[in-house]
Image: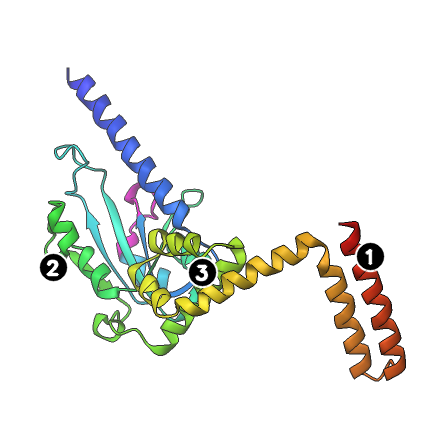
Amino acid sequence: MQNVDENNSKLLQEKEEAEIQKQGEEKYNPKAKARYFVAVLYPESMIPNWQDVIDDTLQVPYCYCVHDKDVLQDGTTLRKAHVHIMVAFNNSTTTKHALEVFNLLCQKGKGIKYCEMVVSVRNKYEYLIHNTNGAKKANKHLYDVSERISGNNFDIGAYEQLSTADKREMRKTIASIVNACSFTNFAELDEYVRTKMSDEYYDEFICYQGYFANLVRGCYNSLKTELSGETSFIRELKELKAQLQAEELTQEEYREALNKLRVEYRHNRLDD
């Protein structure tokens, strides 16, 4: 009977860990930038005596809490011990770089595959010990404040307010996502930011939705132009204008080349 219970516990453990892993990897964007990141590491995969060498290993401000009293979704089975770690960089950096920093604490070949951007530093700081409304509603174990360890001059007070630079980086990140994902529908972009990014990103998105709507419209028109075959003609027209400005063509030569391009363009439209 004990073996059966242990097997069931192991299966439940693996199922939940797989779900968490999947959700984390879906949100992971290696090119996205932020100043604050959080990751979950497992002691058995970390370097020996990691708590003794974490300062010199990470070399950036950090705070962490070892979660060894969490339970699985069944409400009774103890979850495998894990460590929530948050780091703070002086300037915005890519998620890929942040992941490399976290993996300095892992044994070779046992590194984690994703980490998450943090904007609401206070909320994440309190979540480390489950001192948030969401964690309390979910009846998660409340860890003692003394179990939240910080180092390398981690200063929560200095990180709480979003600076103008932080907000600008957030807007740049969303704009980069529009281009990378080739969004052609504003509703799709809204769903992406709302479901895959933090509330702070969504707040910034709402404040500048007109700007992002124009980006999506521009992406749509660019793809439409490419599909219609007009891109090559636009490219040739730009080259003609550049040659005229560089005085490589006279006004007469430019008009002659332009008329020729117009004829080719009309024929192309008629053939379509």
Mark 2 vs mark 3, foreground winner is: 3
Q: Nearer the viewer, residue 22 or 52?
A: 22
Q: Nearer the viewer, mark 2 or mark 1?
A: 1
Q: Secondary structure at mark 3?
A: loop
Q: Is residue 17 above or below residue 114?
A: above
At a point 26% along the width and 74% down the height, the residue shown is 161
Q: Which mark is residue 259?
A: none
- Residue 185 visible in rendering: yes
Q: Amino acid at mark 2?
A: Val
Task: Please provide the residue range marked out in magenta.
Answer: 41-51
When the figure is inspected, residue 93 is found, relative to residue 42, above or below; the finding is below
Residue on which disc 2 sits: 145
Residue 160 drawn at (x, y percent): 24, 71
Q: Secondary structure at mark 1?
A: helix
How far apart marks 2 and 3 lie (CA) works out to 31 Å
For the residues labelled 1 and 3, the Cα–Cα distance comes to: 44 Å
Distance Cα–Cα, label 2 vs label 1? 74 Å
Q: Residues within 10 Å of mark 1 (few under 14, many from 20)?
A: few
Which residue is drawn at the image coordinates 75% and 60% (left, top)? 232
In the rendered image, residue 49 lying in the magenta stretch gets the answer yes
Q: Amino acid at mark 3?
A: Ala
Of mark 2 and mark 3, the one earlier in the sequence is 3
Q: Earlier in the sequence, mark 1 or mark 3?
A: 3
Q: Establish if 207 lies above or below 229.
A: below
Q: According to the image, label 3 marks what residue?
A: 32
